Image (tube, grey):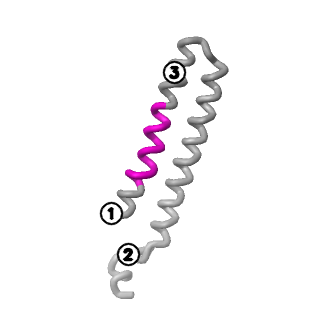
Amino acid sequence: MQVAGYLHDDITQILYRMRLQMGIVDELLRRGDTRNARKELARAEESRDHAMNQVRAVVRDLRRSPIGREGLGQALDS
């Protein structure tokens, strides 16, 4: 439940923001406003990097989980 909440509350929102940012980039390019499109694209890239860092954090936390590589049975035994 914690991982699901983390994915929903953090990563999904970042990805949604990226979707909006790319829509803005598309509109700016249609208008021929490449200068502002580049700025918005840079913001989208920052969002992408943030999302990647969040995913890495989730994976890192899962690896540190009490279940770990030994599985649920070993975690229950310990």
- Relative to 75, does residue 26 appear above or below in the rendering? above
Quarter placement of the N terminus? bottom left
- The residue under the point 46% across, 33% down is 19
Going from N to C along the chain, the mark reached first, 1 or 2, is 1
Q: CA distance from mark 1 to mark 3?
A: 36 Å
- Relative to 43, does residue 35 appear above or below in the rendering? above
Residue 38, percent from left and from top: 64, 26
- Relative to 35, does residue 31 appear above or below in the rendering? above
User: Farthest residue in the top direction?
Assistant: 31
- The residue under the point 40% across, 75% down is 67
Q: Main secondary structure of the magenta part?
A: helix
Say which amino acid is labelled 2: Gly
Q: Does dot 2 land on a helix, a strand or a loop?
A: loop
Crowd tier of the residue under label 3, counting other residues whose Cα lies within 10 Å: few below 14, some 14–19, many 20 or above: some
Say which amino acid is labelled 3: Asp
- The residue under the point 56% across, 18% down is 28
Q: CA distance from mark 1 to mark 2?
A: 18 Å
**Residue 18 is inside the magenta segment:** yes
Q: Which residue range is magenta in the image?
A: 7-20
Q: Mark 1–mark 3 contact, CB under 8 Å?
A: no
Going from N to C along the chain, the mark reached first, 1 or 3, is 1
Q: Give left or right: position of 16 versus 77.
A: right
Q: Which residue is mark 2?
A: 71
Residue 10, percent from left and from top: 45, 51
Q: Which residue is mark 3?
A: 26
Q: Nearer the viewer, mark 1 or mark 2?
A: 1
> Which disc is residue 1 wearing?
1
- The residue under the point 33% across, 83% down is 76
- Relative to 49, does residue 18 appear above or below in the rendering? above
Crowd tier of the residue under label 1, counting other residues whose Cα lies within 10 Å: few below 14, some 14–19, many 20 or above: few
User: Farthest residue in the bottom direction?
Assistant: 78
Q: Does dot 1 land on a helix, a strand or a loop?
A: loop
